[in-house]
């Protein structure tokens, strides 16, 4: 235990130490806050954020055809699948899938990667997904690969007719963006 | 810097390892912490530190703004407005950069006048002073080109008028101007090269600042008495004494800047620069940014084109030979009764030139401008050499300590 | 210290005299009336209802000739502005016809405006605008309150005036719109209208506002001066949509710096306590 005299002697320097620490703390907080605008300015700006949804007409896409549209600067595949393609996709047992999760932002999280979970129920002929290989971001080539779906030429990933990864280095199925039908033949992505 | 001669024993093994291979820690300790500094520096001496911070603020905010700015005549104006309206905190960064430029000049003018009053340019600090003049000139060039980038009316016409100064050069003037423009008018190519140079020059500036500090650390700081430190009793280590004092002054200075940035962000700018550049319509009054006004006034005070340009550049370059124009052996204006008056008249003269520069060159403004220009050169060429020979300086203190003691005695009695 | 203050004061006054506002006087336009607006001062904010009224005036009166091309429809619903609801802003946007394209056939087409669109200008380019207005160009109003100043002449010699009253842009717009009059000398000019606040006093735009020219939904009486004020405030917002954010942040920054500087001063004093200097 310290005596009263010792406390008095140390009183001044203790007060100073407190002042130094308090000032340093206040300075650190201020510097931290001042850095934020310089970091945040690199985030998407208001005009980019405003462009988050886009509308697309499906009517001109015939069976067995696909188009690539642009959403938020990224390519999106919209494919009008043939009954054969749908059958093929449905026939795949879950155990054959490399990634068993649907990766569909419209389906419940963690939903199984069944064919129907990759599309909108009742609109199974239309497959909408990001044209971005989940390996390192190349655009896969359509109607190609060992599973009649998509094939990424960059590093050899094979996707099936539901856009699910079957072979190659890509870790997950092609992602399905958030979209909904506003009428029978029109969708809004985003 | 001459830090390699000092050998410190660092306790941390990693620091020790690195320092024995690249002595940056020794350098820091010797030049930024233990550096012996006169103990009587007043607050006018904090502007060096303030300027260093301003350079850093301008560099960082500028680099960040360049991420969103488009240096094309068609898009420049709108890209600045895009920064102001859409980019996250874009308005903050742009107002910081624009007002930062003005605050930078306020600080540099105070810094220069402080050097003049206390004779900081005198032997052995001539090179330090001359590098300072080059820094000032580089700052002006950088600021001028930066002001062109928003591509408003004042940007455009300021660029046109200032680049046209070079047309005064005999024989090759017109070719030089065409070369500067990259065309037959200020246009896209001009804007592009100004952006490139505006980005480059600050780094040149930073290099010059490095030389400036190096040249400062050879003789050490001047001080309000102008008497060199004689013993250890006259100096204190830079850290923590001056680091803390400078930091305090920096925060106070930044408060003034923040007040402008947040509550009067366009006060130091010009309304016309919110009108997109139009090569077909000249604004009624072309006024450069306030920090150029004194030099602009000198330019316009001379009725001849070439001589006006020469006068303007001379008014800057004459600063380079200032150490040899002042004949007095006494450094500090404190001990020079006549010079002290002359100094304040000179400051007043510069302010008058500033006011004249902001007004149209006609009527009484023209006359006042001519008198003030005449006095500007009179001060350097005639008065400074003469007064040094004529005046009888007050007795100098034997040392800094003696002066400090005398002052504190006077205070306590 | 006393001396320091004295020299600082002198430098301050002279510095103010040296401000860029220092420009020619001479017999130019009349000084704008110094209206007081709710957005002035350190804590000033825009009056939402007034911004909405001002938008109505812009939309019904000004937009026929003047664009607002730097403003997006989405801005109408953003905080710090008129703060229309998103649905209202969408409806406002949808009234505009935006030229878009090319479509799959390579044709340009018109579609209703979206929130992400910028305000559609009434003329496709300056030449068309001039051709439609007897050779006079109706300026875009996006930055009009920042690109005009309301103070001239004798006030200008008081450079501190602009520091505390701003550049007078919104005051100028109000004064101009409410200030049409007959020329005191009884003069008339073909295609020009007398307005003492305008540079040169003769303006191509005829007096655009009339009493009850618009009908305010909030019941405010639509006098000419009221409409002029409202639209000036709306344009002040359009020119500086981040003003409220700026002032709010600025107050916090200054408060912080005040505290920090006091602490630093105490630190400095504590460190220097044993040094005579």
Image (tube, grey):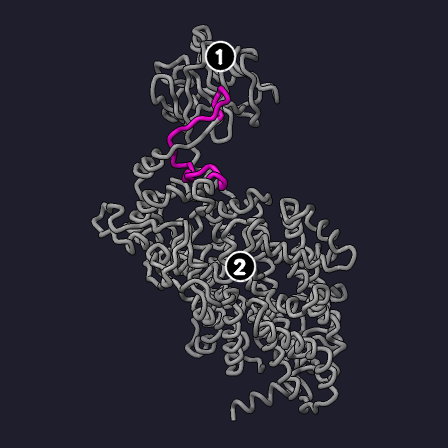
Query: Is C126 in the magenta?
Result: yes
Which residue is under mark 1? A65
Q: Nearer the viewer, residue C54 or A180?
A: C54
Magenta stretch in the rendered image: C102-128
Quick one: label 1, few (<14), some, or many (20+) residues within 10 Å? Answer: some
Residue C1: mark: none
- Tags 2 and 1 touching, CB below 8 Å: no
What residue lies at 40% left-to-right and 26% top-to-bottom? A178
Locate residue C176: give its quadrant.
Answer: bottom left
On screen, residue B290 versus residue C241, left or right, reads right
Query: Is B57 in the magenta?
Result: no
Q: Secondary structure at mark 2?
A: loop
The chain letter for the residue carrying disc 2 is B
Judge whether B359 appears above or below A148 on screen: below
Q: Quick one: which residue is furthest to the right in this view?
A: B171
What residue lies at 57% left-to-right and 57% top-to-bottom? B57
> Is label 2 or label 1 in front?
2
Judge whether C137 appears above or below A111 on screen: below
- In the picture, which quadrant includes the C terminus of chain C? bottom right
Q: Quick one: which residue is furthest to the left in this view?
A: C219
Q: Secondary structure at mark 1?
A: loop
Please provide percent x and percent y for residue B321.
75, 73
Locate residue A89: give its quadrant.
Answer: top left
**Residue B284 visible here:** yes
Which residue is under mark 2? B284
Please provide percent x and percent y for residue A32.
49, 54
Quick one: label 2, few (<14), some, or many (20+) residues within 10 Å? Answer: few
Locate residue B146: give its quadrant.
Answer: bottom right
Please provide percent x and percent y for residue C26.
48, 67
Q: Nearer the viewer, residue B287 or B224?
A: B287
**Residue B214 visible here:** no
Q: Quick one: which residue is furthest to the bottom in this view?
A: B413
């Amino acid at each position: 235990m310290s005596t009263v005299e010792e406390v008095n002697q140390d009183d001044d320097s203790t007060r100073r130490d407190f002042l130094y620490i308090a000032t340093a703390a206040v300075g650190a907080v201020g510097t931290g806050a001042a850095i934020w605008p310089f970091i945040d300015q690199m985030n998407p700006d208001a005009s980019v954020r405003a462009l988050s949804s886009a509308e697309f007409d499906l009517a001109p896409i015939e069976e067995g055809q696909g188009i690539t549209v642009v959403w938020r600067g990224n390519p999106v595949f919209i494919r009008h699948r043939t009954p054969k393609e749908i059958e093929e996709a449905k026939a795949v047992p879950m155990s054959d899938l490399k990634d068993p999760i649907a990766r569909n932002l419209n389906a419940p999280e963690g939903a199984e990667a069944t064919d129907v979970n990759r599309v909108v129920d009742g609109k199974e002929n239309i497959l909408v997904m990001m044209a971005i290989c989940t390996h390192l971001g190349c655009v896969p080539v359509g109607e190609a690969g060992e599973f009649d779906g998509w094939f990424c030429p960059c590093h050899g990933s094979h996707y099936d007719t539901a856009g699910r990864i079957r072979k190659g280095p890509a870790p997950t199925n092609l992602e399905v963006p958030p979209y909904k039908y506003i009428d029978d033949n029109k969708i809004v992505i985003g | 810097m001459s830090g390699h001669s000092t050998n410190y024993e660092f306790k941390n093994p990693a620091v020790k390892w690195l320092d024995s291979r690249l002595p940056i820690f020794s350098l820091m300790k010797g030049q930024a912490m233990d550096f012996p500094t006169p103990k009587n520096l007043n607050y006018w001496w904090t502007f060096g530190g303030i300027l260093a911070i301003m350079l850093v603020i301008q560099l960082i905010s500028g680099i960040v703004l360049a991420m969103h700015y488009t240096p094309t005549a068609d898009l420049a104006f709108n890209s600045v407005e895009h920064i102001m309206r859409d980019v996250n905190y874009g308005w903050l960064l742009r107002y910081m950069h624009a007002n930062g430029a003005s605050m930078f000049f306020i600080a540099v003018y105070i810094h220069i006048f402080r050097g003049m009053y206390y004779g900081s340019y005198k032997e052995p600090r001539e090179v330090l002073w001359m590098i300072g003049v080059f820094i000032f000139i580089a700052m002006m060039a950088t600021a001028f080109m930066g002001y062109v980038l928003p591509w408003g009316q004042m940007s455009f016409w300021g660029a046109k008028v200032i680049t046209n100064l070079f047309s005064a050069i005999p024989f090759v003037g017109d070719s030089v101007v065409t070369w500067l423009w990259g065309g037959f008018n200020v246009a896209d190519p001009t804007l592009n090269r100004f952006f490139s140079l505006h980005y480059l020059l600050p780094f040149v500036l930073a290099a010059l600042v490095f030389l400036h500090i190096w040249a400062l650390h050879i003789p050490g700081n001047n001080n309000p008495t102008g008497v060199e430190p004689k013993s250890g009793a006259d100096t204190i280590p830079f850290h923590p004494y001056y680091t803390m004092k400078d930091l305090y002054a920096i925060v106070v200075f930044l408060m003034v800047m923040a007040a402008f940035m947040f509550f009067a962000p366009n006060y130091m700018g010009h309304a016309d620069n919110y009108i997109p550049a139009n090569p077909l319509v000249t604004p009624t009054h072309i006024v450069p940014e306030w920090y150029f006004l004194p030099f602009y006034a000198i330019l316009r005070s001379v009725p001849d084109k070439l001589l006006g340009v020469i006068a303007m550049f001379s008014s800057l370059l004459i600063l380079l030979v200032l150490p040899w124009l002042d004949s007095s052996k006494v450094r500090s204006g404190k001990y020079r009764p006549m010079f002290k008056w002359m100094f304040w008249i000179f400051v007043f003269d510069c302010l008058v030139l500033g006011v004249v520069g902001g007004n149209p060159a006609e009527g009484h403004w023209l006359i006042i401008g001519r008198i003030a220009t005449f006095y500007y050169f009179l001060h350097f060429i005639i008065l400074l050499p003469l007064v040094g020979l004529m005046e009888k300086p007050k007795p100098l203190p034997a040392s800094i300590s003696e002066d400090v003691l005398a002052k504190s005695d006077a205070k306590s009695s | 210290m006393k001396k320091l203050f004295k020299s600082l004061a002198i430098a301050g006054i002279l510095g103010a005299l040296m401000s860029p506002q220092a420009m020619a006087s001479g017999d130019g336009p009349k000084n704008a009336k110094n209206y007081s607006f709710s957005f002035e001062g350190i804590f000033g904010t825009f009056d939402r209802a007034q911004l909405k009224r001002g938008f109505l005036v812009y939309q019904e009166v000004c937009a026929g000739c003047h664009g607002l091309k730097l403003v997006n429809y989405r801005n109408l619903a953003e905080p710090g502005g008129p703060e229309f609801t998103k649905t209202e802003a969408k409806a406002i946007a949808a009234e505009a016809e935006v030229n878009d394209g090319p479509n799959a056939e390579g044709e340009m087409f018109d579609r209703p405006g979206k929130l992400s669109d910028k305000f559609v200008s009434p003329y496709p380019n300056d030449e068309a605008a001039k051709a439609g207005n007897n050779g006079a160009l109706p300026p875009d109003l996006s930055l009009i309150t920042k690109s005009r100043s309301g103070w001239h002449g004798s006030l200008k010699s008081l450079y501190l005036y602009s520091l505390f009253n701003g550049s007078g842009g919104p005051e100028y717009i109000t004064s101009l719109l409410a200030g049409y009059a007959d020329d005191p000398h009884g003069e008339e000019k073909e295609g020009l209208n007398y307005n003492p606040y305008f540079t040169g006093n003769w303006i191509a735009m005829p007096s655009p506002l009339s009493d009850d020219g618009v009908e305010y939904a909030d019941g405010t009486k639509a006098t000419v001066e009221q409409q002029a004020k409202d639209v000036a405030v709306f344009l002040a917002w359009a020119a500086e949509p981040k003003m409220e954010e700026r002032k709010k942040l600025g107050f916090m920054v200054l408060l912080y710096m005040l505290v920090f500087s006091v602490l630093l001063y105490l630190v400095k004093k504590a460190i220097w306590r044993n040094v005579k200097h």
